[in-house]
Image (tube, rainbow, N blue to C red):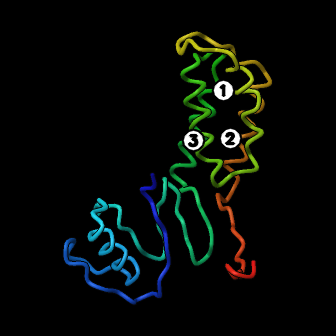
């Protein structure tokens, strides 16, 4: 099951799509019409296009080939990590929440994954979501390191442009 599909088209090459009463890039309009013929459901809010897109909360610039974490999201995450680390004890559910949020950020900060090693180690084998788990110095140090690096990062992960031929490569 796939509910997100991405493509490209020449800028300014738009076609009218009557069911949504809007102009979309030509290739996107053709895909929507195909889906209509096949009976594939779709919705107007999911039909995005532009020079920059917001995808799973990240700003994606396909022309610059960058994925950026918005400053507000970054600041909220840093604050949450520091708040979590300020305590001596948290329950498993709180551990899972902060780990999940940090994992989401690894889409643009992939080299910061080691910052959760001790967090996952502390969660290992635990099943009661409300059982308290101590935050030892290793966990606190890792989270401090992680929050500092997220805060200082420009939040950009660059991709490489590669020319390829589907037959030769």
- Helix, strand or loop at label 3? It is helix
Q: Nearer the viewer, residue 107 or 32?
A: 32
Mark sitting on residue 36: none
Alpha carbon separation for disc pair 3 and 2: 8 Å
Mark 3 vs mark 1, CA separation in Å:
12 Å
The answer to whether the residue labelled 2 contacts the one labelled 1, judged by CB atoms less than 8 Å apart, is yes
Q: On the image, which quarter does residue 68 sit in?
A: bottom right
Q: Position of residue 122 (x, y in %)?
A: 72, 20
- Contact between labelled residues 2 and 3, with CB atoms less than 8 Å apart: yes
Is 66 on the left-hand or right-hand side of 116? left
Q: Is residue 94 left or right of residue 85?
A: left
Counting other residues with Cα less than 10 Å from the Cα at mark 1, is it few (<14), some (14-19), or many (20 or more)?
many
| Residue under the image location 62 percent in, 68 percent down | 66
Mark linked to residue 147: 2
Residue occupied by mark 3: 77
Q: Of helix, strand and loop, which one carries label 1?
A: helix
Mark 2, other Cα within 10 Å: few <14 / some 14–19 / many ≥20? many
Element under disc 2: helix
Q: How many marks?
A: 3
Q: Position of residue 121 (x, y in %)?
A: 75, 23
Q: Which numbered circle lies on residue 85?
A: 1
* Residue 166 or residue 25, whichever sits in front: 166
Q: Residues within 10 Å of mark 3 (few under 14, many from 20)?
A: some
The residue depicted at 67 percent of the width and 79 percent of the height is 166
Pick whichever of labels 2 and 1 is earlier in the sequence: 1
What percent of the width, then of the height, locates residue 159?
Answer: 69, 68
Counting from the top left corner in percent of width and height, residue 61 is at: 55, 71
Q: Name the residue: 24% across, 77% down.
A: 22
Asked if 20 appears above or below 4 in the picture, the reply is below
Q: Could you give the CA–CA distance between mark 2 and mark 1, rounded to whole angstroms? A: 10 Å
């Amino acid at each position: 099951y796939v509910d997100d599909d991405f493509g490209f088209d020449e800028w300014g090459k738009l076609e009218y799509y009557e069911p949504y009463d809007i102009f979309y890039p030509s290739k996107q309009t053709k895909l929507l019409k195909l889906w209509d013929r096949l009976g594939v459901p779709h919705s107007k809010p999911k039909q995005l296009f532009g020079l920059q897109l917001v995808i799973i909360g990240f700003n994606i610039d396909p022309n610059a080939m960058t994925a950026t974490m918005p400053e507000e999201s970054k600041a909220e995450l840093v604050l949450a990590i520091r708040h979590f680390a300020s305590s001596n004890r948290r329950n498993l559910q709180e551990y899972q929440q902060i780990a999940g949020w940090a994992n989401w950020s690894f889409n643009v900060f992939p080299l910061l994954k080691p910052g959760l090693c001790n967090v996952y180690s502390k969660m290992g084998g635990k099943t009661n979501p409300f059982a308290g788990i101590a935050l030892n110095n290793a966990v606190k140090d890792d989270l401090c390191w992680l929050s500092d690096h997220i805060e200082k990062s420009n939040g950009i992960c660059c991709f490489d442009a590669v020319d390829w031929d589907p037959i030769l490569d």
